[in-house]
Image: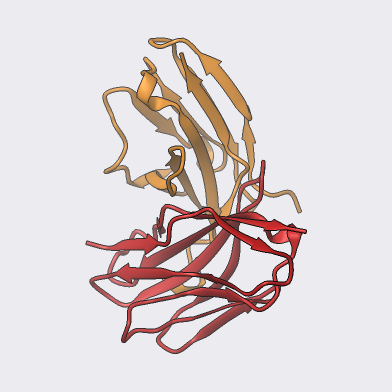
Amino acid sequence: EAGVVQSPRYKIIEKKQPVAFWCNPISGHNTLYWYRQNLGQGPELLIRYENEEAVDDSQLPKDRFSAERLKGVDSTLKIQPAELGDSAVYLCASSTGQAYGANVLTFGAGSRLTVL
Amino acid sequence: GNSVTQMEGPVTLSEEAFLTINCTYTATGYPSLFWYVQYPGEGLQLLLKATKADDKGSNKGFEATYRKETTSFHLEKGSVQVSDSAVYFCALSDLGDSSYKLIFGSGTRLLVRP
């Protein structure tokens, strides 16, 4: 079974440019998460989807970040315009959304963004 | 609020040495606790978990016991291998937080030398 697939793996852009990341979760996983991992730190949640609905986007910087999950499967995270401080690894994860003890997240390999 | 604190790395050990990575937490409810591992160039993988006090999670020779009295979930392994070199993240998911999100510590890098 394929895991969580993310693309691109690496992206280098200049500040003020737009960038988009794509995620394909594990088949059957209704819950999808986008996390941001800054260098030397643990991942921090940006947004969580239950099917196509964003149910927790409180940590998403909405002035420049947007996300969508059309048809409740694949998801795209966009940054426009990018700033130097956005350099990080963007992780996508998915889960079945079961009760907390069984809610194991499966992570993709991440998309590493460098903003120059 | 909820938080996780891990010992800073890197932790450098020789092969077959005993490993302990400390993790303590703060939670308003009754959290589940997790250890995730991130190998170079790969995504985070669940290593083990525990859902209630005194539970012991174990996998691949690693163990961690949920200690409510000390709010700790220390990771241990009796004999590390070079292949265990990775970054280890302690995390919690709080029963009182219906978002099911994981809150991570900052990670501890382990380097095992032959």
User: What residue sits 46% from the left and 38% below the top?
Assistant: A39
Residue B92, quarter of the rendered image: bottom left
- Looking at the image, residue A85 sits to the left or right of residue A107; the answer is left
Measured from the top left, where is residue A83 in percent x and y? Answer: 36, 18
Q: Quadrant of the N terminus of chain A?
A: bottom right
Residue A11, quarter of picture: top right
Q: Is residue A29 visible?
A: no
Name the one closer to the observer, A63 or B104.
Answer: B104
The answer to whether residue B9 shows anywhere in this view is yes
Q: Residue at x 66, y 79 (%)?
A: B78
Residue B108: x %, y % from top left: 50, 56
Q: How many marks?
A: 0
Q: Is A24 situated left or right of B1 in this image?
A: right
Kindly identify the residue that appears in the image at 44 percent across and 82 percent down.
B66
In the image, residue A41 above or below residue B27: above
- Which residue lies at the image location 44% right of the left edge and 33% below the top edge? A68
Q: Quadrant of residue B2?
A: bottom left
Closer-to-camera residue (B81/A1): B81
Closer to the camera, A26 or B86? B86
Image position of B105 (left or right of B88): left
Report the side of B7 relative to A6 (left or right).
Answer: left
Picture layout, residue B60 above or below residue A109: below
**Chain displayed in orange:** A
**Chain letter, red in picture:** B
